[in-house]
Amino acid sequence: MNFDFLSSKKAGIDLGTANILVYVKGQGIVVNEPSVVARHNRDNAIVAVGNEARAMQGRTPGSISVIRPMRDGVIADYLTTEAMLRYFIGLITGRFNIIRPEIMVTVPAGVTSVEQRAVRDAAEQAGARKPAHLVPEPLAAAIGARIPIGTARGNMVVNIGGGRTEAAVISLYGIVVSESVRMAGDRIDEAIVSYVRRRHNLIIGEKTAEDIKISIGSALPIDEGLTTQVRGRDQLSGLPKTITLNSIEVAQAIQDCLGTIVQTVRAVLEKTPPELAADVIDRGIVLTGGGALLRHMDELLTQETGVPCYVADNPLECVAIGAGIALDHLDVIKRSLPTEEENLVGLFPTPDQR
């Protein structure tokens, strides 16, 4: 007889602004879906979650709203986030599993204790075993990228997600220096929407902007000059219209956003102690998150900082994988992880340490 329903699973959850990924020990990434929920406006009943809800975006009647309950890496709608987590936790535990899973959820390194508490409470209410563990995203990203963070040497990771970009120098399982800025994939998409409206009088949605970014977006001008057909609504006539957009235009549209990310990385390098800075120069900067997949993003950062940068293997999955692996090493890093009793210390720098 199979008694799997009596076993407790361990899972790492990357609770991102744009996507939610779940890593289960022994199974790998089992969930990779948009952090999107569709609900009825009358009673807030959940209609769809994840991919199904994303497919409804911009196509719903007035009675249904499609929302993203996470904003800039933190919870913007608590009840909807809880419902979303319950749905995805249910996917990994199965219908008849009576043992709550042990969960590690990622949070931005720069969030407040109130925001951290909201994430923990939402995870526990959604079905995680108490206490749900939290881990800073830069640390999880470093672990998932297989960076040797347990040594007395500096390692730098830059995680470019949907809502935030976080840069951190890590040594001996702790974050020594970090910076977090609310500039990442979502703001880049918004910049493309704004540019297309301003330059071509064409109104497009966020999903179209994201498709443009993926298909022809680049952090640096590219010689091949990629183009794509963009469909939207003409701002003047109100009628459907199709234009051709090229990669040079997209690079112009997003250059201010990328400049902010570069400044964040520079700020961390400037605050890094000399010995650790030498290690970072020697080892380079590791890029993770969806933003790392933007063409030539590593080359831009190398060019602007003078420090070698490279994209981690499977950058989209690093944070979730790292959160799951961290569960197996709680005895090593537990002093750095926030608990029910402790005042979030260690990996989360206190205000006087920042």
Image (cartoon, rainbow, N blue to C red):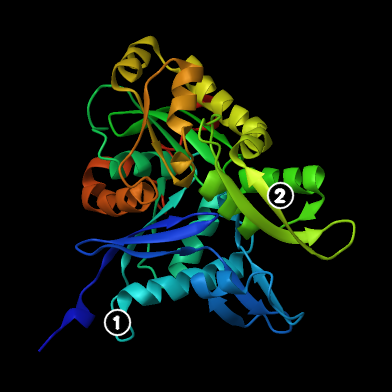
In the rendered structure, the answer to whether residue 309 lies left or right of residue 313 reads: right
Of labels 2 and 1, earlier in sequence is 1
Residue 172 x, y percent position in the rendering: 27, 29
> With respect to residue 151, does 55 lie above or below?
below
Residue 136 x, y percent position in the rendering: 42, 43
**Badge 2 is on which residue?**
193
Q: Which of marks 2 and 1 is in front?
A: 2
Find the residue positioned furthest to the bottom. Answer: 1
Is there any visible trace of residue 50 in the rendered image? no
Which of the pair 298/167 is nearer the observer? 298
Name which quarter of the figure residue 324 lies in: bottom left
Q: What element carries label 2?
A: helix
Instruction: Give the CA distance from mark 2 to mark 1.
Output: 46 Å
Find the residue positioned furthest to the top. Answer: 274
Which residue is located at x 51 percent, y 51 percent? 116
- State which quarter of the image contains the N terminus: bottom left
Q: Which amino acid does label 1 sit on?
A: Ile
Which residue is located at x 44 percent, y 67 percent? 124
Which residue is located at x 61 percent, y 27 percent? 259
**Badge 1 is on which residue?**
98
